[in-house]
Image (cartoon, grey):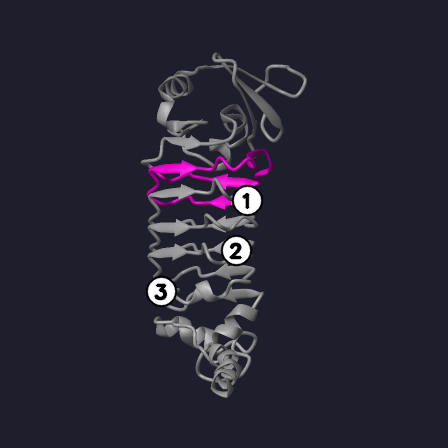
Amino acid sequence: MKKLLIILLYLPMIGFGQNVNIPDANFKAYLVGEPSINTNGDSEIQVSEAAAFNDTIDCDNKNISDLTGIESFTLLNALSCNNNNLTNLDLSNNIELILIYCAYNQISSINVSNNEDLIMLGAENNLLSSIDVSNNTNLVNLICYSNQLLSADVRNGNNQNAEWYMFSDNPNLECINVDNPTYSTNNWLVAFGMIDSSMYFSSNCNNSTLIQEQTKNKKLLKITDLLGRETKQINQPLFYIYNDRTVEKRIVVE
């Protein structure tokens, strides 16, 4: 009984002293050098230190190739890892994340499937072949232009609250899965740099041939102002009316 009691007393101490596995030397150097993270000032990051941290990791421009170890930061609020050498990013264990900035890497895959509180994902200038934010029901900003996207699924029930969903400069992306194709067609515009002219929206891109043909072949009938008068003046809201009965709201500024 005494031996058992001694073992039980030491178990919390053993867990407290465990170190996070951080194989990338540059990432580890950043974490160890942050007093708000490395609270005991040693040369390692303990599991307890990572688990207690609930602020921002900002490791831009650190020549980091691997963020292994970040999964231990379960209360992390924000991550900025722009301008590094990352090739993949799995943040499914960081369920408290609100903001993610990971632009200018070589990321080909990203997992944000468990990040329900996420409101911002900036992943431009990477090598992403697909993006799926269908579980991110609070997302209002998705910046993924200049990638290699073949597919995009943003059917998260929050499209009408979106501020910027940007897919331009993805030459192989044609169809984008959205909540409401009509809404996205009228609001996510080429003129705003949100999409390329070759892209279109569907609620099911696997069955959207007819939608694609209608969108690509539609013809502009007239341009009107807010009062319905035909005009081509700039610097004011204009409505572009097409022969398929769709209407686009645009503002051309010069």
Left or right, residue 192 beside residue 145: right
Query: Is there any visible trace of residue 113 in the rendered image?
Result: yes
Residue drawn where x is 36% and y is 31% of the image: 174
Q: Quadrant of residue 229?
A: top right
Residue pointed to by mark 3: 66
Q: Residue at x 39, y 64 (%)?
A: 67
Q: Position of residue 38 (x, y in %)?
A: 52, 78
**Which of the marked residues, 3 or 2, is nearer the chain's N terminus?**
3
Q: Work out how far the residue at label 3 is from the one at label 2, CA to CA, in angstroms.
A: 19 Å
Q: Nearer the viewer, residue 235 or 112?
A: 112
Region in magenta: 142-170
What type of secondary structure mainly makes up the magenta span? Answer: loop
Residues at marks 3 and 2 touching, judged by CB atoms closer than 8 Å: no
In this rendering, the answer to whether 169 lies above or below 39 is above
Tag 1: amino acid: Leu
From this viewpoint, which residue is outermost toward the front? Answer: 1
Which residue is at the front of the view, 139 or 10? Answer: 10
How far is disc 1 from disc 2 in space, using C-alphas?
Answer: 14 Å
Earlier in the chain: of badge 1 and badge 2, it is: 2
Residue 126 shows in the view: no
